[in-house]
Amino acid sequence: MSENELLEHKRHTLAHLLAAAVMKLWPDTKRTIGPAIDNGFYFDFEFTHPLSEKDFGKIEKEMRKLLPTWTSFERSELTSDEAKKEYPNNQYKHELIDEFTADGSKVSFYKSGEYSDLCRGGHVENPKEEIASDSFKLDRIAGAYWRGDEKNPMLTRIYALAFDTKEELDQYIAMQEEALKRDHRKLGKELDLFTFSDLVGSGLPLFTPKGTVLREEIHTFSQALRTSRGFQKVWIPHITKTDLYKRSGHWDKFGDELFLVKSQETTDEFVLKPMNCPHHTQIYAGKNRSYRDLPLRFLETTAVYRDEKKGELSGLSRVRSITQDDSHVFCRPDQIEVEYQAIMNMVVEFYKVVDMKFRARLSFRDSQTPEKYFGEESLWDMAQEKLETIAKSGGFEYFIAKGEAAFYGPKIDFMATDALGREHQLATAQLDFVQPARFELTYTDSDGTEKTPVMIHLAIAGSLERFLSVYIEHTAGAFPLWVAPVQVKILPVSEKHNEYGASVFATLKNAGIRVEIDDANESLGKKIRNAKKEKIPYLFVIGDKEVEAGTVSVENRDGSEGAQELSVIVKSLQEKIIARS
Amino acid sequence: MSENELLEHKRHTLAHLLAAAVMKLWPDTKRTIGPAIDNGFYFDFEFTHPLSEKDFGKIEKEMRKLLPTWTSFERSELTSDEAKKEYPNNQYKHELIDEFTADGSKVSFYKSGEYSDLCRGGHVENPKEEIASDSFKLDRIAGAYWRGDEKNPMLTRIYALAFDTKEELDQYIAMQEEALKRDHRKLGKELDLFTFSDLVGSGLPLFTPKGTVLREEIHTFSQALRTSRGFQKVWIPHITKTDLYKRSGHWDKFGDELFLVKSQETTDEFVLKPMNCPHHTQIYAGKNRSYRDLPLRFLETTAVYRDEKKGELSGLSRVRSITQDDSHVFCRPDQIEVEYQAIMNMVVEFYKVVDMKFRARLSFRDSQTPEKYFGEESLWDMAQEKLETIAKSGGFEYFIAKGEAAFYGPKIDFMATDALGREHQLATAQLDFVQPARFELTYTDSDGTEKTPVMIHLAIAGSLERFLSVYIEHTAGAFPLWVAPVQVKILPVSEKHNEYGASVFATLKNAGIRVEIDDANESLGKKIRNAKKEKIPYLFVIGDKEVEAGTVSVENRDGSEGAQELSVIVKSLQEKIIARS
């Protein structure tokens, strides 16, 4: 049995134990079902009295009292009638029993201690020995319709957390609390990064000046990585005639998910672009290309649109207008390796700077189902081999996922891990053997023949909005200096220090540092508390001594750096900003 | 009589002269009408033989033979019957005569020399003396339906150019030829700046890497002017629920001209934004604002959408997706003057750098029709007075246009003049007393009361696409160094100089200069010709001497600058780029 299976069995066993405790405490309760879930288990009951989380202590105590008496599980088989007798007046269990015995078969019951329940199995053999009595915790109460159908009665669901050990349970609870504190929607409001408007609509965030700094810094970094490697910026409109996607094939595949745009002046049928590649092919197609012009590398940070259902929208994680740091390389097949190598280097550098580990998923074709993939088999084999060679030498974890390739080519998806250990798919680099042919893109090869280039789709941050949702939580809003919307806050101790404060402000501003000054008539303590709440990386405190000496007292997030010459600290900050540290 | 009227009379007189010459040469021709137009005149005929532009010489010669015999105009009045007798078998003239005499009145005829025609007047008194025989020129032939109705017969229209003097005529012809050479659609293709795709649609240009450099440089300059004056970048999505424009009032006014966006997943009604101000108000509204926070200055270069009729689309001049270098200032009424002064300074600086003169149109309210304007009268008066004071001290031409204000406030429109003397409205700065109230924007004033801020809408380049259409023609594609997509082209004399060429290339690239190298196996002459065609500002020629001395031979557009140390010319170019010269 795998560790995962064992944990699932523990959780399911604990669901029985919860039901046993509840039935002991309130024998009139109707019990229904109780499966294991990702972080524990739940059980649905119909109580004869309203349950509250205040009862959790009593229930847990009863569970812990019963656990030592559970030393094994006994399985038995009962006929429908026998089974129903176990649950007098419990229409829920009766309904299940009727279903399970419809073909005349018996149903299985599992019993441990004095508690027996209709069950298909999946328990630990000896609960007393195998389950630590401090490894679980009742979590919360929720309403749940019987069998998830809103026409059925509403039952009371008790959720519980359960892990192998108390340490793991505590760790999980601490992480949940931390995640709640770091929630980017909460921090977005507290740090004044973005806002929503009912008049504009859900899934359509508006970025304030501070949030726009975040967007700009991430975009500028991603762009700089690419321009230094020969990528060139292009620009495309956000709408297009549907013809473009009919040609690319996206219309047939994603037509239902597109935002349709209606022209009232013409009969043109437009859509909001759901991706940028087809537009970029049209820039390639605007001119004759020679083998000497390749690779041609286009980059553009621009929005694509997804018509998400409202229930799926959440903060910046899932939006309707998605800004991608997108790029498309048009190259010859013999250039794939060099281009991919450069791409991997960029991804490594980016995630090093944003301080997130990642592993690469090489999404390859499944050779058992060749009909699912377009393009020449030999091209696929050659490309996949090269991608693996590159991944091998990359110094990062990777794994091959057979059958995960797109129909148009193999790809590498990068799964980044945040400070709470959660994994997010952000960057992606996809080979495309199909679109260049569909758009009849060609280049004149050295032998004078017309050939079809290969395309590589690349996004490094991925979606800026989604990346920021992860990054805000990863950093808990305490952004490193180079990203921080406000890099330095100047805190004059009292009003008489405001003049020198203003001159320090001007010096920093001229030095290209994002700076604010708090010259309100308030105590230094309050000013420092406010600035800490804003998670500003550097505070410059200015009092009599500093004015006299022409210095500033520097506080960073870790503590005091003491008084420093203004020119020295400015130079040091500039160097850190340039180094993106 | 004004000069303009006199010129119009000359042109109309010449239309008579053209008809006289035609009737002399081909007496069976049916003449119809011949008015003056902007650059000359035309006359519509029904010929019995096909006319070609080869006949122009003959016609002009006849016109010049007749002109000395035209020393006066005689007016006479004829009855319908008398008039018709003048035009045997000419159904067109008969139709006109019937119309003009329907109420029993007579029609007027004008005669000069031996030629008489139905006419309402508007000639010079003495054509022989007043019209220079070399001041006109037949221009081209076009088909034109009688009375502009396609159900009528197609007539032959002869267009002619006519000015006061030969010099003006020649100048006009030269300017037309120059305008044709500078046509941004032609240069856009030749210089590989932008392209269109049938799959994407008309009015939706795609910008190549070179064209994107133009966009970026203009945008970056316009943005730098603003960020240095306290404007902060924000970011908004391109779609919004219609609710936003219903609240702003734009829906009622422009609803028909909007691109409607249909969600297939939800019932939300969206539009593509036709302007950015309502979105920006929602960022303002996202937080409580105090009088100390104002002015708040948002900037964003972003697209708005106009559902133009296809016939109205042309190159970059008129597009469906319009990128504005937009900004919105939210300020207190007492801050209007300082804010406007800063805005005027930016506009002056921008148009100085792009080397275009401008004049300002102060678009004010008409006090005779107060019902057309929203907002307090005293606020209008105060604001208009301030705008005029600022314009007065601005050192540029301005004029007041009463009744040209928007309903929501007075504005200043800037009319820039290009190298061919054509005037274009580009920048605009508009006061807005209405939207802040509609969106219920407030700030807490120093006395604790809630007040409504004033908005200023500002665009400096205006629409980037339209600005570029003007700027490409203004510069004839010979962009100044700071804007040029390729700033330096390196031309190795032969293949053995390519290696040194590559090292020069690397040096320039590292210095942030946009550089290309032409290392093809071709003659220097051909390389130079190609580079000149691309209108690149600086060519670095590299031969034996340069390799040996570690120099480059510099050619700018005016000629040779001789051999220069690489580090010296790089530094000099960097300085020019930073100074935007």
Image (cartoon, coloured by chain):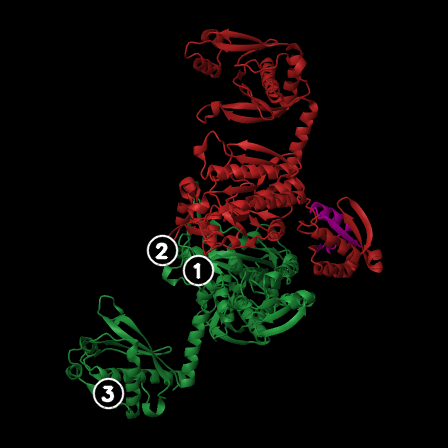
Chain colours: A red, B green
Q: Nearer the viewer, residue B191 or B563?
A: B563
Query: Helix or strand or loop: what does disc 3 sit on?
Result: strand
Query: Looking at the picture, which amino acid does disc 2 mark?
Result: Thr
On the question of residue B437 being in view, the answer is: no
Q: Position of residue A461 (x, y in %)?
A: 59, 45
Asked whether A206 falls inside the magenta stretch, the response is no
Query: Looking at the picture, which amino acid does disc 1 mark?
Result: Val
Residues at discs 2 and 3 in contact (Cβ within 8 Å): no
Q: What is the span of residues highlighted in magenta in the rendered image?
A: A516-542
From the viewer's perspective, tell me whether residue B336 is left or right of residue B568: left
According to the picture, the residue beneath numbered tag 2 turns out to be: A266
According to the picture, the residue beneath numbered tag 1 turns out to be: B319
What is the C-alpha distance between the residues marked 1 and 3?
A: 49 Å
Q: Nearer the viewer, residue B272 or B474?
A: B474
Chain identifier of the residue bearing label 3 in the image: B
Asked whether A533 falls inside the magenta stretch, the response is yes
According to the picture, the residue beneath numbered tag 3 turns out to be: B115
Query: Helix or strand or loop: what does disc 2 sit on?
Result: loop
Q: Nearer the viewer, residue A463 or B1?
A: A463
